[in-house]
Image (cartoon, grey):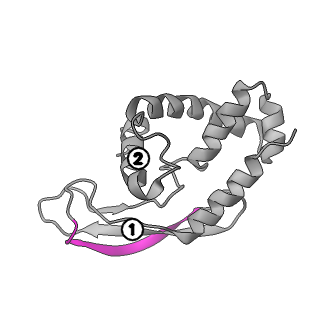
């Protein structure tokens, strides 16, 4: 039985290349008008060594403590190098009896990478159940909730960084 893991990584990379950015709002003060583009940085796509440019922004509000920020397009997650749909597929397949070694072979990743992904996936699944039970998975309607999701995700999983 083949798994959909490589197809998920490929399609997530295709979506990320489109670099869909919703409204740009400062995550600290909520400012919309005093936000300007402030360079960019690159994140690797999910299925290879190709990189995608992520736009950085600067908040010019004098009363805001945030200097720069970026708005991650769907399906990029803060800090993590795998898309949300991949994490959810991994946990689903693992719960159906697929071993970590089998998932690693199917995804073309190392065993340790898949094990770390499964650990994060368990936490993410619980987070989604608690925080987003009313709307379901952010992957299904990214234009509406992706920015909100990534902000809440950052605060929940990496509180010292954000």
Q: Is residue 39 visible?
A: yes
Check the picture and name the quadrant holding the N terminus: top right
Q: Is residue 115 visible?
A: no
Label 1, on which residue?
Answer: 56
Instruction: Give the residue at x 33% y 66%.
Output: 23
Q: Residues within 10 Å of mark 2 (few under 14, many from 20)?
A: some
Label 2, on which residue?
Answer: 149
Instruction: Give the residue at x 56% y 45%.
Output: 84
Q: Earlier in the sequence, mark 2 or mark 1?
A: 1
> Is residue 118 placed above or below 39 in the rendered structure?
above
Q: Main structural element of the magenta stretch: helix, strand or loop?
A: strand
Question: In this orientation, which residue lies closer to the viewer: 72 or 128?
Answer: 128
Q: Point out residue 120 in the picture as x, y percentages from the top left corner.
A: 57, 34
Residue stretch in magenta = 32-43
> Is residue 155 placed above or below 67 in the rendered structure?
above
CA distance for labels 2 and 1? 18 Å
> Is residue 83 placed above or below 21 in the rendered structure?
above
Q: Point out residue 2 in the picture as x, y percentages from the top left corner.
A: 85, 42
Asked if the stretch drawn in magenta spans residue 38, the answer is yes
Question: In this orientation, which residue lies closer to the viewer: 150 or 159?
Answer: 150
Q: Is residue 31 left or right of residue 93?
A: left
Asked if the stretch drawn in magenta spans residue 53, the answer is no
Q: Which mark is residue 19?
A: none
Instruction: Give the residue at x 70% y 39%.
Output: 113
Q: Nearer the viewer, mark 2 or mark 1?
A: 2
């Amino acid at each position: 039985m083949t798994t959909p893991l490589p197809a998920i990584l490929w399609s997530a990379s295709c979506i990320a290349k489109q670099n869909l950015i919703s409204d740009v709002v400062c995550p600290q003060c909520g400012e919309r008008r005093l936000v300007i583009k402030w360079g960019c940085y690159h994140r690797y796509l999910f299925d290879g060594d190709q990189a995608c440019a992520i736009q950085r922004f600067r908040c010019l509000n004098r009363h805001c403590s945030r200097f720069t920020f970026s708005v991650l397009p769907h399906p990029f997650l803060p800090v993590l190098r795998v898309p949300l749909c991949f994490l959810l597929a991994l946990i689903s397949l693992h719960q159906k009896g697929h071993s970590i070694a089998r998932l690693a072979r199917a995804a073309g990743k190392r065993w340790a990478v898949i094990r770390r992904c499964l650990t994060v996936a368990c936490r993410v699944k619980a987070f989604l159940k608690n925080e987003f039970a009313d709307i379901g998975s952010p992957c299904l309607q990214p234009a509406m909730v992706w920015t909100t999701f990534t902000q809440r995700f950052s605060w929940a999983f990496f509180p010292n960084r954000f």
